[in-house]
Amino acid sequence: MSLFRFKNSQTNPETIHQIKSWVYDSLQLDHEIPISISQLRCSEPGCPPIETVISVMHQPPQTYKIHKPATKIEHRDILNMLNP
């Protein structure tokens, strides 16, 4: 799996802000806790071409993955990510 950001992303700041807002609300986080959102490319068999990684930087840090580009993420994806 490549750990480099997907450079040809069509993700706009509003999309990232919406995803972060859903994560803050769903986890009831203080908005001072940083959240990082990255899109990664994967070329391994069976791996989605692009996945979105959401890292919540509290102690201990938590990382979540959604197997689709950020532009395709919906609120229900965040809820499913948090409640598998």
Image: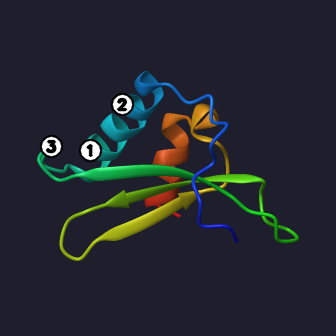
Question: Which residue matches tag 3?
Answer: 31
Percent of width and height locating residue 82: 43, 59
* Neighbour tally class for label 3: few under 14, some 14-19, many 20 plus, Cα within 10 Å: few
Circles 3 and 1: CB atoms closer than 8 Å: yes
Q: Which mark is residue 52?
A: none
* Neighbour tally class for label 2: few under 14, some 14-19, many 20 plus, Cα within 10 Å: few
Q: Residue at x 64, y 34 (%)?
A: 72
Q: Amino acid at mark 2?
A: His
Q: Along the polypeptide, which appears first: circle 3 or circle 2?
A: 2
Image quarter hosting the N terminus: bottom right
Percent of width and height locating residue 81: 50, 57
Q: CA distance from mark 3 to mark 2?
A: 12 Å
Q: CA distance from mark 1 to mark 2?
A: 10 Å
Q: Residue furthest right?
A: 45
Q: Residue at x 53, y 40 (%)?
A: 76
Which secondary structure, mark 1?
helix
Q: Is residue 58 left or right of residue 47?
A: left
Percent of width and height locating residue 75: 48, 36
Q: Which mark is residue 17?
A: 2
Percent of width and height locating residue 34: 22, 52
Q: Residue at x 46, y 60 (%)?
A: 83
* Neighbour tally class for label 1: few under 14, some 14-19, many 20 plus, Cα within 10 Å: some
Q: Quadrant of residue 20?
A: top left
Question: Which residue matches tag 1?
Answer: 24
The foreground one among 43 and 63 is 43
The foreground one among 7 and 24 is 7
Q: CA distance from mark 3 to mark 1?
A: 7 Å
- 34, above or below 20, in the image: below
Q: Amino acid at mark 3?
A: His
